[in-house]
Amino acid sequence: MSIRAWQVHRLGDAADVLTLVDAESPRPGPGQVRVRVLATGVNFADTLMCRGEYQVRPEPPFVPGLEVCGEVLEVGAGVTHVAVGDRVLGGTAVPHGGYASECLMEGESTFPAPEGLDDAACAALMISYQTGWFGLHRRAGLREGEHLLVHAASGGVGSAAVQLGKAAGAHVIGVVGGADKVAIARDLGCDVVIDRREQDTIETVKEVTGGHGADVVYDPVGGPSYQASTKCIAFEGRIVVVGFASGRIPEPRLNHAMVKNYSILGLHWGLYKEHDPQSVQDAHAELVRLADAGHVAPLVAETFGFAETPAALARLAGGSSTGRIVVTA
């Protein structure tokens, strides 16, 4: 049986190298799951993979798309926790990624989809919220009442951290770029929203925390955002380095970290699947609990039809989107 799939035959910008083809339906190997794709979350990592710049570098031709919600069609040997007909979410098994009518998923990162979230929201739950949960709880040890500073608070990664921070009882300060994003960040639950184009982030953080500073910083941006964080970090504060959406990788001044007594914490969520897979399962159970209780819900800002997949990746690569972008079947 054939399927429709967006394949990369040569590396480059996603909008230029994705080609819609008829392909054979993939067969699940041991520990894998074949699903009918209901929705695919668009991630910055997908654009990097198309350019050959992601840590996972499949040889062309391949189908990108790292995160999906789907209906189980077939399970491979050793998979017992999901069954045919189940609605699931999770991570794909590239080269048979999510920008297709069917894809393969890794059984260890295939989870039951929360009943309270629709397909698009489920497709946007795993990567952003698992990253946020591990960053805030496992790495930074966020405590109730602490001041949490979230950069790019209206974006896909930042919006998850805002909701998780509020669920943990933190005082959340969101940083956004532009007046149009202020209301979005406030609606997500930020106690304070800073428009970095109009306000000084450093001075505002000091002011709203009474001079205390940010106990935890969640930074998916890098560049100037990281530098500002080091100047308003609290005593024994923790800066969680999540990514470099600004395109600039900062060079930390370790003497400054020593003198001001703060920690710089790197986060590569994917390593937990390798080193501590049970923790990923436990985090998902907690995320389902929070979703069912209404404490977290992915901010799906835009949806694109399957035929518009290249445009969806181009939209994300443009850097002006808010929330998550999802491709729907």
Image (cartoon, grey):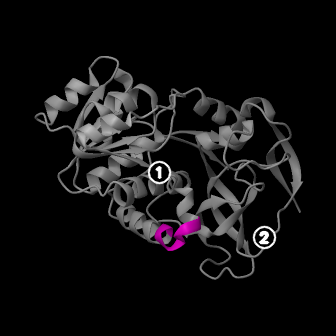
Mark 1 or 2, closer to the camera: 1
Residue drawn at point x = 67 percent, y = 43 percent: 54
Q: Secondary structure at mark 1?
A: loop
Q: Main secondary structure of the magenta part?
A: helix
Disc 1/disc 2 C-alpha distance (Å): 30 Å
Task: Indicate left or right for 269 with 314 as reference.
Answer: left
Residue drawn at point x = 50 percent, y = 40 percent: 243
Residue linked to disc 2: 28
Amino acid at dot 1: Leu
Is residue 153 visible to the viewer in this orientation of the structure? no
Mark 1, other Cα within 10 Å: few <14 / some 14–19 / many ≥20: many
Is residue 51 visible to the viewer in this orientation of the structure? yes
Task: Indicate left or right for 289 with 216 as reference.
Answer: right
Residue drawn at point x = 52 percent, y = 57 percent: 126
Camera-side residue of 278 and 254:
254
Camera-side residue of 216 and 113:
216
Camera-side residue of 273 and 287:
273
Q: Earlier in the sequence, mark 1 or mark 2?
A: 2
Q: Is residue 51 magenta?
A: no
Mark 2, other Cα within 10 Å: few <14 / some 14–19 / many ≥20: many
What range is drawn magenta here?
Answer: 274-280
Quadrant of the image containing the N terminus: bottom right
Count of labels shown? Answer: 2
Task: Indicate left or right for 163 with 90 as reference.
Answer: left
Q: Position of residue 315 (x, y in %)?
A: 60, 30
Name the image quarter holding residue 292.
bottom left
Q: Which mark is residue 267?
A: 1
Name the image quarter holding residue 286.
bottom left
Amino acid at dot 2: Pro
Q: Position of residue 169 (x, y in %)?
A: 22, 55
